[in-house]
Image (cartoon, rainbow, N blue to C red):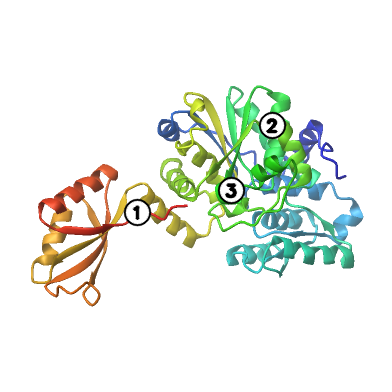
């Protein structure tokens, strides 16, 4: 079926019964720390606790269980760079359904390896999902495999909608739910479930500003293809939302906001510190929406009970370390500056003792003599220093000024 209305509330209810034994009903606790941070009563739907680290398991298991006997015997194929592939691989193994996954060549090595360990046949093809999909279609034609779309398949949308059923039972007095938007399958399913049970509950979608394909579809009145740069929320970097998913979502979503890269980075850091959760960029966007006060779009949620759908936690450890460093810089807790000091004994000691006296901690320090200018009696020192907050950083600057240590440049994190 390809129409925009071929997923019903009853499909979601049946999907819940169908997948119950194979998918975790994730908790949705209130977080006092996050509530204090953003001024709302914040509950977090912890979908990153699923066995493969994302909500994708719900739709994948539902779609596999709906296959007829012949289709299950032949197997399924999908184009995916990550979470959908992992979900199909795991549940295909459990249900005895052969799974083929076509991944773009840039797909993270850790996800390629994990899919193989789960028993999937993994092929690398193309520079993007669209090219990988072309290869997957060849398997459909040549081997009779069933293609399972990651966000536009009716069974996938119904499976993701089970999150909405759980939320209205776990937090029945919620005022709003904030949901990440990539291909729109997740918010379509949640929207259909929530608005059927709780029509007054506000549904807010959030997209990375660099990958705002849903906003583009709203403006055009239909899904449109975008070219987009990379984003921390790579799980949401879908060039075009699904036609079926968009048709369902636009009937139920009250508004959509976009967030920038720095705010996503800061949200990942906040979730690690305050929720003790490792959440990928896509999963952190709901908190980013509340942190992005500059837009003012969600200020009216202050004091309200809000559910954040933390949809996944599959972030590469190397990327996570870089994101945390960047988040600390965005938060004003890492400062970097270039100072001019005397190139003689005691010059560096004076700088470091001044830093220490303020209670700051040196993370890295580098001398530059060859390119420091014509004054050979001085040397440039590039310092990265950890401070408590922005105010502490300003106190450090004042202390350096008071000692006559000239700061010629103070760096700031890269913008959008």
Residue 165, numbered label: 2
Q: Nearer the viewer, mark 1 or mark 3?
A: 1
Task: Say which label, 1 or 3, has the lower sequence index.
Answer: 3
Few, some or many C-alpha atoms within 10 Å of disc 1 (few <14, some 14-19, many ≥20)?
Answer: few
Q: Quadrant of residue 374?
A: bottom left
The residue nearer to you, when weighing 358 against 208, is 208
What residue sits 82% from the left and 63% below the top? 137
Please say if 195 is above or below 112.
above
| Residue annotated with mark 3 | 312
Q: Quadrant of residue 73?
A: bottom right
Task: Say which label, 2 or 3, has the lower sequence index.
Answer: 2
Res 162 seen here = no
The percent position of residue 227, horizontal first and vertical second, equals 64, 57
| Residue annotated with mark 1 | 412
Please say if 247 is above or below 70.
above
Residue at disc 2, secondary structure: helix
Residue 178, numbered label: none
The percent position of residue 8, horizontal first and vertical second, equals 81, 33
Q: Is residue 39 left or right of residue 138?
A: left
Residue at disc 1, secondary structure: loop
Few, some or many C-alpha atoms within 10 Å of disc 2 (few <14, some 14-19, many ≥20)?
Answer: many
Distance from label 2 to label 1 (Cα)? 43 Å
What residue sits 11% from the left and 66% below the top? 347
Distance from label 2 to label 3 (Cα)? 18 Å
Q: Is residue 223 left or right of residue 75?
A: left
């Amino acid at each position: 079926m390809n129409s925009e209305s071929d997923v019903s509330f009853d499909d979601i209810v049946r999907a819940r019964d169908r997948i119950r034994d194979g998918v975790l009903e994730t908790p949705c606790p209130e977080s006092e720390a996050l509530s204090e941070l953003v001024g709302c009563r914040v509950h977090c739907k912890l979908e990153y606790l699923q066995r493969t680290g994302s909500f994708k398991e719900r739709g994948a298991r539902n779609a596999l269980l709906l296959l007829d006997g012949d289709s299950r015997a032949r197997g399924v194929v999908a184009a995916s760079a990550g979470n959908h592939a992992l979900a199909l691989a795991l549940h295909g193994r459990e249900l005895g359904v052969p799974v083929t996954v076509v991944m773009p060549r840039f797909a993270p090595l850790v996800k390629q390896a994990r899919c193989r360990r789960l028993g999937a046949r993994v092929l690398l093809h193309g520079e993007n999902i669209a090219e990988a999909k072309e290869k997957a279609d060849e398997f459909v034609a040549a081997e009779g495999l069933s293609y399972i779309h990651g966000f536009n398949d009716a069974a996938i949308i119904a499976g993701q909608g089970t999150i909405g059923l759980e939320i209205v039972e776990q937090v029945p007095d919620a005022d709003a739910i904030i949901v990440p938007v990539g291909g729109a399958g997740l918010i379509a399913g949640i929207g259909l479930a929530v608005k059927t049970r709780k029509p007054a509950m506000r549904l807010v979608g959030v997209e990375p500003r660099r990958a705002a394909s849903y906003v583009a579809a709203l403006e055009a009145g239909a899904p449109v293809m975008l070219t987009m740069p990379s984003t921390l929320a790579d799980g949401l970097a879908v060039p075009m939302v699904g036609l079926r998913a968009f048709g369902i979502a636009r009937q139920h979503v009250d508004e959509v906001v976009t967030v920038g890269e720095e705010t996503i980075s800061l949200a990942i850091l906040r979730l690690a510190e305050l929720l003790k959760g490792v959440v990928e960029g896509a999963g952190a966007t709901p908190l980013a929406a509340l942190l992005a006060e500059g837009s003012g779009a969600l200020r009216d949620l202050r004091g309200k009970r809000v559910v954040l759908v933390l949809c996944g936690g599959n972030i590469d450890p190397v990327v996570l370390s870089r994101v945390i460093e960047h988040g600390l810089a965005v938060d004003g807790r890492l400062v970097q500056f270039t100072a001019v000091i005397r190139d003689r004994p005691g010059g560096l000691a004076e700088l470091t003792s001044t830093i220490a006296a303020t209670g700051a901690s040196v993370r890295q320090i580098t001398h530059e003599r060859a390119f420091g200018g014509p004054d050979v009696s001085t040397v440039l020192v590039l310092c990265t220093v950890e401070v408590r907050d922005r105010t502490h950083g300003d106190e450090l600057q004042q202390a350096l000024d008071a000692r006559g240590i000239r700061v010629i440049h103070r760096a700031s994190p890269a913008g959008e």
